Image: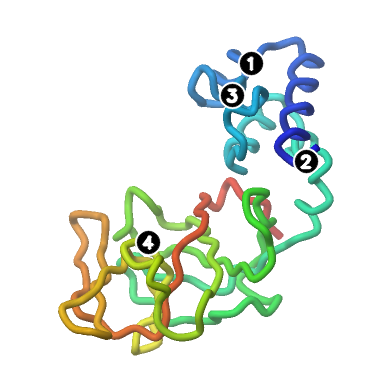
């Protein structure tokens, strides 16, 4: 039984124990009408951590009661939020590696493996509505220099040539070695033809209020 099966089974049991139904829980959690049913039937194979937190709050239980068999890994694997990345704000890179220390620690969401994962927090709103101030971004450094070709065109955590950290959509620039750092907020400026030290795509983004924190 994989983690998705465990979540589905525990969720069905908890709903029955609380004398409610899938539709009522989905409505109270602010999900679409079939949101809970889709998790139980495995139509949604990897529900987000934020969704599980909302459902747990409706049922009046801890999210670990839904995660069940994955609870030990959920509570064991804490990830340091190593620093902040600018989304419109200019933020110096504090720590580009996972070293165990950081601003604070968050629980590794069940959708990703904790191995090699780094977390950072968004400051500024240039990537709104995709990423809001305070969002926790999870990424993994695939390379110490440059950017993997498959990450070009995607939202990435970026360290520019001046040691500043950003979250931007990265596109190829007008010359080799240069990149456009694109803001998604139409009221924010983008940076054109920039040199970067490295960039890695964002694997997962969660509002700070939706992650377990120490």
Instruction: Give me the disc on residue 22.
Output: 1
**Image point (65%, 51%), residue name:** 109
Return the residue at label 4: 155
* Position of 72 relative to 147 (above/below): above
Judging depth in this view, the residue of 60 and 38 nearest the camera is 38
Q: Earlier in the sequence, mark 4 or mark 1?
A: 1
Question: In which quarter of the view is residue 176 placed?
Answer: bottom left
Q: Determine whether, in the image, residue 70 is placed left or right of residue 203.
A: right
Reading the image, the residue beneath label 2 is: 64
* Residue 207: image location, x then y, percent: 51, 50
Look at discs 2 and 4 and give the one toward the viewer: 4
Q: Which residue is mark 3?
A: 38
Instruction: Answer whether residue 165 is visible to the viewer in this image.
Output: no
Q: Secondary structure at mark 3?
A: helix
Secondary structure at numbered mark 4: strand
Q: Which of the two discs, 3 and 4, labels the residue nearer the N terminus?
A: 3
21 is higher (above) or lower (below) than 93: above
């Amino acid at each position: 039984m994989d983690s998705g099966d465990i979540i589905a089974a525990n969720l069905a049991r908890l709903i029955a124990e609380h004398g409610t139904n899938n539709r009522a829980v989905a409505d109270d959690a602010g999900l679409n009408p079939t949101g809970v049913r889709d998790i139980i039937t495995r139509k949604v194979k990897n529900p987000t951590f934020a969704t599980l937190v909302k459902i747990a709050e409706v049922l009046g239980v801890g999210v670990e009661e839904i995660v069940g068999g994955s609870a030990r890994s959920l509570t064991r694997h804490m990830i340091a939020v190593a620093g902040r990345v600018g989304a419109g704000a200019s933020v110096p890179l504090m720590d580009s590696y996972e070293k165990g220390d950081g601003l604070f620690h968050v629980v590794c969401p069940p959708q990703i493996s904790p191995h090699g994962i780094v977390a950072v927090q968004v400051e500024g709103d240039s990537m709104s509505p995709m990423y809001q101030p305070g969002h926790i971004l999870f990424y993994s450094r695939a390379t110490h220099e440059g950017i993997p070709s498959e990450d070009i065109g995607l939202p990435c955590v970026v360290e520019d040539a001046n040691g500043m950290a950003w979250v931007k959509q990265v596109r190829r620039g007008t010359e080799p070695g240069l990149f456009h750092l694109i803001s998604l907020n139409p009221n924010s400026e983008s940076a054109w033809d920039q040199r970067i030290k490295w960039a890695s795509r964002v694997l997962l983004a969660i509002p700070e209020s939706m992650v377990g924190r120490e």
